[in-house]
Image: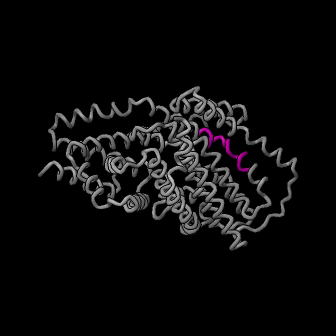
Amino acid sequence: MTDVAIGLTGLGSLMALIALRVPIGVSLIGVSFIGLWSLMGSRVAWGALGVIPYQFTANWVLSSIPMFLFLGFISYHTQLTKGMFNAARIWLSAIPGGLAIAAIFGSAGFAAVSGSSIACSAAMGRIAIPEMMKHKYHPELATGTVAVAGTIGALIPPSIILILYGVIAQVSIAKLFLGGISAGILTTVGYIIVVLVRVKLNPELAPERDEKTSLSERILALKDTWPIFLIMIGIFGGLFGGIFTPTEAGAVGAFLACIVALISGELTLERFLKAARETTMTTASLLIIAIGASLLTRFLALSGAGDYLSSGIMSVASNPALLMLGIVLVYLLMGMFLEPIGAMLLTLPIILPVVDNSGWSLLWFGIVLTKLLEIGMITPPIGMNVFVIKSVVGDLVKTSAIFRGVMWFIVMDLAIVALLSAFPALVLFLPELLQ
């Protein structure tokens, strides 16, 4: 069997293991190890297993991942984002679908102190959905809005997906963060448009509220938003002011979140330890998958299968538009069955050379890729954000109803992907300011 055939066989075995629900990290490491053994012998395989995990995890930038995760979990368990939703609710009370729009704004605010769309959906689901249900919003609109709004968490920095992508693709994390801001804002605006259009077409989805608020009440509501804005100013002010690096920003943000939660009286020892425990478990699972992806990259490089597949993709889809369409379809399909980080790390060894050879900006592609991966968080049958919302609402709303609620937003997501693909400057204009 030729080296390329061994590589392709390894990829086929990997897909089979994932289809059998073997954990993706275990599948990546196992297939890569056996593949390297078949190619180069046991000594090289054991050597790679000993060296590559250290080489990957010794990257200083990766230390920001547990810090940003801890920041998100502290914010979640101490409900630091509750004031953001309440302020948006009061300010938007006169707008049709105002509560749903408030949930989108609240999610965007939480996204600025978190890197996880799941945490974003869970936090806002517990705050916003009961409020919408109380005002007789249609369950599909209420749950669907919060499920999709959570995906903003992976676009607006800090973003765990963007950090991992930057490390693997060797792209500036700070520039990726800036690119994510414009894509996140565009997504937020798109979701608000969907709510407004749906409520305009069917006012029964969001009955008008008779709640009247004075200007003084609206201004007073803004005082509860100080925790989020303080953390945001601390992170982004220091990051883009050159005071500290993206790596250090995670630690600064986590420290600020603890101080703010302590001042507000929401931080208890139990909540602190719970956030620390969840951070440790999530970091470990992410790094295991990332180490497996690094081993797979080495295996594909040595076998020649990576170059073989990349050149094959380039020859079949020589037209840039067709190539982009193919990449979009691949990630949409993978998103139906795999969680985003696993799907990204599984495919980057093959996709990155294709993108690089096409002359596309790796920075721009990272943002588009993140957007595609987040669409997978709301698509059936395994839309993780949908099941997070299901766990929040329990038996009040069927899973099928939540999936129906997100479909309108998926159409908008695809339109945004098309817009970002057609006009890369939408992503690149902010990062270019750093040059």
The x, y position of residue 41, in whole percent, is 14, 38
Q: Is residue 174 above or below residue 427?
A: above
Nearer to the camera, 130 or 395: 130
Q: Residue at x 83, y 60 (%)?
A: 211
Color scheme of the displayed model: one colour
Q: Magenta residues? A: 73-86
Residue 119 place in picture, x, y as percent: 56, 47
- In the rendered image, residue 39, in percent from the top left (x then y), is placed at 16, 43
Q: Would you say residue 175 sits in the magenta stretch?
A: no
Residue at the spot 47% in from the left edge and 48% down from the top edge:
364
Q: Is residue 387 visible?
A: no
Answer left or right for 291 relative to 308. right
Can you see residue 95? yes
- Residue 337 vertical position relative to residue 236 in the rendered view, above or below: below
Camera-side residue: 424 or 147?
A: 424
75 inside magenta stretch: yes
Q: Is 251 or 396 nearer to us in this picture? A: 251
How many numbered marks appear?
Answer: 0
Image side of residue 309 versus residue 109, left or right: left
Q: Position of residue 393 (x, y in %)?
A: 62, 60
Main secondary structure along the magenta-highlighted residues:
helix
Q: Residue furthest left?
A: 1
Drawn side of residue 4 relative to residue 433, left or right: left
For residue 208, which quarter of the picture?
bottom right
332 to the left or right of 264: left
Q: Residue furthest top?
A: 243
Q: Residue at coordinates 42% horizontally, 59% vertically from top-left?
A: 328
Residue at x-position 18% and y-position 50%: 4
